[in-house]
Image (cartoon, helix red, strand yellow):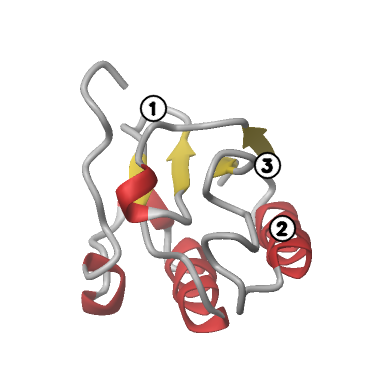
Amino acid sequence: MSVLLTVCRDCCCGTLRKHPTVDHGRQLARLREIAARHGGAIRVSECLDTCETSNVVVVQAKGTKPIWFGFVLDDAVLDDIDTWLTAGGPTTDLPATLTLNRVSPPRGK
């Protein structure tokens, strides 16, 4: 399965100002590894307009609607995304742990 992970950065997501305890560079590197392991790619967006739920990661597979995750602030959420992608990602149900991180996209997205 080929997936595209879109990661919000450079507004409030991905900044030490808003999330001083998160190693944003390491998180981005880990997301790149996850995307590559699942035959996908990563795209960094300047702002996805969901600052109230930062850090935001959007997962999309060909032929599926994007699924938005907010509050991606630790390795546990990245582990859950990776495990879910291994199980089929957007073509499968979300595990309960990721349901907690699911957020709605802003209007028009």
In this view of the protein, which residue sits in the foreground, 2 or 25? 25
Residue, x 54% and y 72% (percent of image)? 78
Residue, x 47% and y 38% (percent of image)? 61
> Which residue bears the numbered disc 2?
28
Indicate which label's residue lies in the foreground, 1 or 2: 2
Q: In this view, does 8 lie above or below 69?
A: above
> Which residue bears the numbered disc 1?
63
Residue that protrudes farthest toward the top in the picture:
108
In this view of the protein, which residue sits in the foreground, 68 or 36? 68
Q: Position of residue 94 (x, y in %)?
A: 26, 64
In this view of the protein, which residue sits in the foreground, 56 or 18? 18
Question: Hey, what amino acid is under mark 3?
Answer: Ile
Q: In this view, does 102 lie above or below 51?
A: below
Quarter of the image with the C terminus in it: top left
User: Are there few (<14), some (14-19), or many (20+) residues within 10 Å of tag 2?
Assistant: some
Could you tell me how many numbered marks the image carries?
3
Indicate which label's residue lies in the foreground, 2 or 3: 2
User: Are there few (<14), some (14-19), or many (20+) residues within 10 Å of tag 3?
Assistant: many
In the displayed structure, does residue 67 sit left or right of residue 93?
A: right
Q: What element carries label 1?
A: loop
Report the Cα–Cα distance between label 1 and label 2.
25 Å
Residue, x 30% and y 65% (percent of image)? 101
Q: Is residue 5 above or below residue 53?
A: above
Label 1 close to label 2 by CB (< 8 Å): no
> Which residue bears the numbered disc 3?
42
Q: In this view, does 20 lie above or below 94?
A: below
Instruction: Give the mark nearest the N terminus, 1 or 2.
Output: 2
